[in-house]
Image (spheres, rainbow, N blue to C red):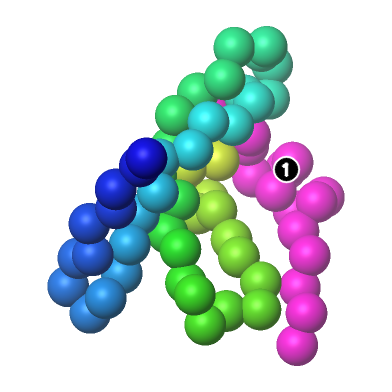
Amino acid sequence: MTEFNFEEYGRVYIPINVKPQNGTILSPIEFKADTGADHTTISKMDLASIGYDMAWIKRNVVILG
């Protein structure tokens, strides 16, 4: 069983593994869970840390609103 700690303002971060842009070995990042959200996101900083550059982000961004 995995336990999660709630931080200030009720935020909870869940460690997940994602595939880097140019690799096959999963990299860990902290995913901020929002139990009241209809959609979730991963920050640009986290994407950049695993090799997804701004050009990739701009090509693949999904904006709903």
Q: Quadrant of the C terminus?
A: bottom right
- Disc 1 residue crowd, few under 14, some 14–19, many 20+, Cα 10 Å: few
Q: Residue at x 55, y 53 (%)?
A: 42
Quick check: is 61 in the magenta stretch?
A: yes
**Kind of residue indicated by mark 1:** Ala
Instruction: Report which quarter residue 54 is drawn in.
Output: top right
Outermost top residue: 24
The N terminus appears in which quarter of the rendering?
top left
Q: State whether residue 64 appears in this view.
A: yes
Q: Which residue reaches farthest front?
A: 1
Whether residue 7 is situated above or below residue 60 in the rendered picture: below
Span highlighted in magenta in the image: 48-65
* Residue that protrudes farthest toward the bottom in the picture: 65
Percent x, y for residue 39? 66, 72
Instruction: Give the vertical position of 64 relative to 58 (above or below).
Output: below
Is residue 12 rendered to the left or right of residue 46? left
Q: Which residue is more in the foreground, 55 or 15?
A: 15
Residue 31 percent coordinates (x, y): 45, 51
| In the displayed structure image, the side of residue 46 where residue 22 appears, left or right | right
Which of 23/7 is in front?
7
* Residue 35 lies within the magenta run: no
Q: Position of residue 28 (x, y in %)?
A: 44, 29
Residue beneath disc 1:
55
Assign a secondary structure to mark 1: helix
Question: Residue 63 appears in which quarter of the rendering?
Answer: bottom right
Indicate the position of residue 2 as horizontal and vertical percent values.
35, 42
